[in-house]
Amino acid sequence: MSKITERVAELALPVVEEEGCTLWDVEYVREAGTWYLRIFVDKEGGLSIDDCERISCRLDPMLDEADPIPDSYVFEVGSAGAERELKRPRDFEQFMGSEVELRLYQPMDGQKSFVGNLKGYDGGDVTIDTAGKEIRFEKSRIALVRLHVSI
């Protein structure tokens, strides 16, 4: 995590927790020439737009005062989402056994995307069970792992 996202996470965490939510991630990215600061939160039983609004209204003046970002940016607070990306070891621990989609940088056996149940996480290497077969993927080959919602 960059220094900006770490500082924003420090500022956001108490507010998010006071609102009965958990801080999932902080993202500071440039898209189409505009900087975005995004705070992703989660809540037992589901997150509402009102939750996001309360957190945003409380954090906005705090961010202005602390001024952790030198550039202008668009500030957003939103849900981590049903198909959230798993990044940290605790994310993988929390969702062990859940269905995930794993994407690779380069194809393996002609395939870049795999869906299966999360079976293991070891230092960044990920094991999933797909169609009764366990496959271990090395960290260096993995582009993305996120929860998968089957329709």
Image: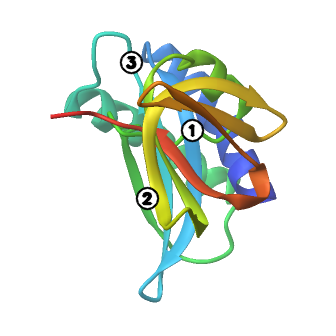
For marks 1 and 2, give the CA distance: 22 Å
Q: Is residue 83 visible?
A: yes
Residue, far bottom: 33
Of helix, strand and loop, which one carries label 2? strand
User: Which numbered marker is on residue 75?
Assistant: 2
User: Which numbered marker is on residue 43?
Assistant: 3
- Residue 145 at x, y percent in the picture: 54, 45
Using the image, determine if residue 56 lies above or below residue 110.
above
Of helix, strand and loop, which one carries label 3? loop
Residue type marked 1: Leu
Of helix, strand and loop, which one carries label 1? loop
Looking at the rendered image, the disc whose residue lies closer to the viewer, 1 or 2, is 1
**Mark 1 / mark 2, whichever is N-terminal:** 2
Residue bearing mark 1: 86
Few, some or many residues within 10 Å of mark 2 (<14, 14–19, 20+): some
**Mark 2 / mark 3, whichever is N-terminal:** 3
Residue type marked 2: Phe
- Location of the C terminus by quadrant is top left
- Residue 123 at x, y percent in the picture: 84, 36
For marks 2 and 3, give the CA distance: 20 Å
- 1 relative to 128 in the view: left or right: right
- 56 relative to 27 in the view: left or right: left
Few, some or many residues within 10 Å of mark 3 (<14, 14–19, 20+): some
For the point 57% across and 18% down, which residue is it?
96
Using the image, determine if residue 60 lies above or below residue 80.
below
